[in-house]
Amino acid sequence: MRVGFIGLGAMGNPMAANLQKAGYELTIHDIRREQGRNFEEAGAVWAANPAETAERSDVVLLSLPGPVQVESVVLGENGVFSGLAAGGACIDTSTNSPALMRRIAEEGASRGIQVLDAPISGGIWGARDASLTVFAGGEEAAFEKYRPLFRCIGKTVVHMGPLGSGSVAKLVNNLIMYINFIGACEGMALGVKAGLDPRTLLDVIKPSMGYSTFMERSMKLSLDGKPLHFVTDGAVKDLRLCVELGRELGVPLDAGPLVESLVTRYRDAGHGQEDTLEYIRDYMRRSGVDLADWGAAISNRR
């Protein structure tokens, strides 16, 4: 099976690397040629645009920042659908809009192209060691056909239902994650300001009811002066998609829009391209927590 991969950023690069390690014939593309050098050195073919990537592939995987980029790469001039032959497939692993995925799938069906939405969760660490969670949506037969690809990048691979279901599951995951994140910032600031050691506090919360995976990972990374490898602009985009889905479905979200407004306010203060975890240190500063009691700076380690 010939595999195309478009989007070789923090998540896409290690995912594509795992596909290459598994022996798939790889054609790659990114807006930055340097992102593909490691793959070319290992035998992958560089394509000049998405259409050329698709021409050389039986299935094309996307790992892109969001809906705007996905729509352009798939449906735009020299897009994937311009080059992918009937019988091929396009799989989007991005955090995306379910409505856009359904529109792309309709266009794909008119061309004889299968479309799956298969967003992933697990961060750069999960991408590197192929332990991601894959939330897949689309026809079950197509899911089974490409399950071997998913197994190369993920440990937990689940067919969520019809096309768009994968994107919905990812947005649900991210909504819960970001609500947990803001709660963790508030709780940790409260504890540290009261004189508790942050690492001891994390240790005692871990076996308790306030624990979440993202709380532990984000707080430990921040305390160690390490980045999440995900910028604030991306967090705002994810939260916007979550809130839009709530409005579309008539679900009265209360916490989601509040968290979106908090992160958007932080982004609009000039932090859009900073690592998301810098929000923690900003919150500590606003809470009057001495950063010497918190951890090393991360703003220059993106």
Image: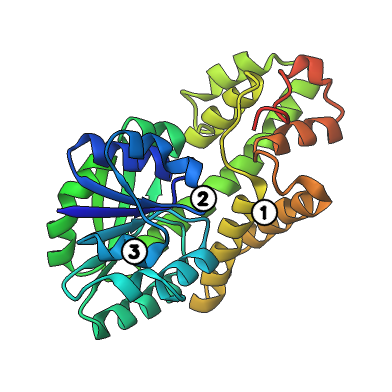
Q: Amino acid at mark 1?
A: Val
Residue 98: x %, y % from top left: 42, 70
- Foreground: disc 3 or disc 1: 3
How crowded is the residue under tag 1: few (<14 C-alpha within 10 Å), some, or many (20+)?
Answer: many
| Cβ atoms under marks 3 and 1 closer than 8 Å | no
Quick check: can you spot residue 140? yes
Residue 152: x %, y % from top left: 23, 41
- Foreground: disc 2 or disc 3: 3
- Residue 149, disc: none
Circle 2: element type: helix
Residue 235: x %, y % from top left: 61, 51
Q: Which residue is label 1 attached to? A: 259
| Cβ atoms under marks 2 and 1 closer than 8 Å | no
Residue 64: x %, y % from top left: 47, 56
Q: Which residue is label 2 attached to? A: 176
Q: Quadrant of the C terminus?
A: top right
Q: Amino acid at mark 2?
A: Ile
| Cβ atoms under marks 2 and 3 closer than 8 Å | no
Numbered marks: total: 3
Q: Is residue 206 above or below residue 114?
A: above
How crowded is the residue under tag 2: few (<14 C-alpha within 10 Å), some, or many (20+)?
Answer: some
Q: Which residue is label 3 attached to? A: 52
Question: Of all residues shown, which one is farthest toward the bottom?
Answer: 110
